[in-house]
Amino acid sequence: MTDKDKQIQRAQTFQALHKKGDLLLLPNIWNVGSALVFEKEGAKALATSSAGIAFDLGYPDGEDITFDDLLEMVSKICRRVTVPVSVDFERGYAETGAQVILNENQKAN
């Protein structure tokens, strides 16, 4: 299965989790270790914490972490877990809607 296929499958799983009628709990993760712990404990999906990732990398909260550092951490997390991951993308690391779209596309790849 290609990375793109895995991403599509995770997106479909994440969407289905919102439709089941059950409460969806999204544990906030901040690095690979926290993601693996919550997945092992049965989390059906995970969500990054922008503050948690920033603090883990030595940045203050508030979009001070670089976009590249965020992408690197999220990529590491997504390579290690099998469940969907929702990313706290703050303000999209952009000042315009067009730049947000470009950043979203970069994040998805």
Image (cartoon, grey):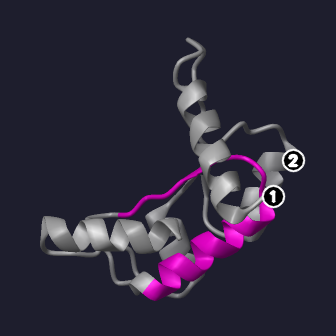
Q: Residue at x 74, y 39 (%)?
A: 43
- Please tell me how crowded label 1 is: few (under 14), some (14-19), or many (20+) other residues with Cα within 10 Å: some
Q: Which portion, as a residue range, is magenta?
A: 68-89
Give the residue furthest to the right.
Answer: 40
Please name whichever residue, 34 or 103, is drawn nearer the observer in this view of the structure: 103
Count of marks, rendered view: 2
Report if residue 42 is visible in the image. yes
Q: In this view, does 86 lie above or below 65?
A: above
Question: What amino acid is labelled 1 in the image?
Answer: Leu
Give the residue furthest to the top.
Answer: 21
- Viewport quadrant of the N terminus: bottom right
**Residue under label 2:** 40
Residue 5 horizontal/vertical position (percent): 68, 53
Give the residue furthest to the left.
Answer: 96
Q: What element carries label 1?
A: helix
Residues at discs 1 and 2 in contact (Cβ within 8 Å)? yes
Question: What amino acid is labelled 2 in the image?
Answer: Lys
Please name whichever residue, 16 or 76, is drawn nearer the observer in this view of the structure: 16
Residue 49 horizontal/vertical position (percent): 50, 60
**Residue under label 1:** 36
Question: Is 53 covered by the magenta stretch?
Answer: no
Residue 21 horizontal/vertical position (percent): 55, 11
- Quarter of the figure with residue 75: bottom right
Please name whichever residue, 6 or 48, is drawn nearer the observer in this view of the structure: 6
- Mark 1 to mark 2 CA distance (whole Å): 6 Å
Q: Which residue is drawn at 60% across and 27% down?
A: 17
- Quarter of the figure with residue 22: top right
